Amino acid sequence: MRRFIATLTASAAMLGGLGLASLTTAAPAHAAGWCDGTKSVVHTSYGHSISLPVNRASGSTDCIMSEGASGPAVTALQTALLLCNNQNLRTDGEFGPITREALAAAQARSGATPDGVYGPETRRSILWPSYLNGTFTGCAVSS
């Protein structure tokens, strides 16, 4: 099996160098690309909102993040892990090993697949900080 994978990888690299083929990593079919921003979503009739990671190009919150990601979407996730999911980590906007481990623990606790990768299943299962007029009011689920 190793020999097959090595041969496949070498062949793809050679063909890719000729412009004939390339190996790429694609987002799952159910996800709308990589999370690269945040979106404030009103979740109650009283105007409470939660800030969710979003793919800015599509406007969808069904996006994915994994180790190596950075920016406001990661900060929103880290804030949720810290304030609402009992995880002790810094909110530095960098999705590193500590964020991956904290996310996997929160996923396991909430019933999501504990793979340390953020996606639609995780968005729906973990708790998010809820705000009213900029004031933290508690934790809520995302639909």
Image (cartoon, grey):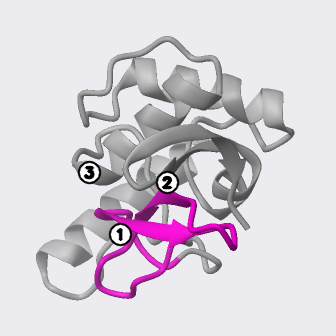
Q: What crowding class fits label 1: few (fewer than 14 Cα within 10 Å), some (14-19), or many (20 or more)?
A: few
Q: Say what amino acid the circle numbered 1 marks.
A: Leu
Q: Which is more foreground, mark 3 or mark 1?
A: 3
Residue 25 visible somewhere in the drawing: no
Range drawn in magenta: 32-61
Q: CA distance from mark 3 to mark 1?
A: 29 Å
The image shows residue 111 at horizontal and vertical percentages of 86, 39
Which image quadrant for residue 86?
Answer: top right
Circle nearer the N terminus (3, 1) = 1
Element type at mark 3: helix
Rendered position, 108 above or below 10: above
Q: Which residue is mark 1?
A: 23
Q: Residue at x 55, y 21 (%)?
A: 101
Residue shown at the point (65%, 27%) measured from the top left: 85
Q: Earlier in the sequence, mark 2 or mark 3?
A: 3
On the rendered structure, is 6 left or right of 21? right
Q: Quadrant of residue 56?
A: bottom left
Relative to 96, is 128 on the left or the right? Answer: right
91 with respect to 48 (left or right): left
Residue 72: mark in rendering: 3
Q: Quadrant of the C terminus?
A: bottom right
Residue that protrudes farthest toward the top in the picture: 88
Dot 2, crowdedness within 10 Å: few (<14), some or many (≥20)? some
Q: CA distance from mark 2 to mark 3?
A: 20 Å
CA gap, disc 2 to disc 1?
46 Å
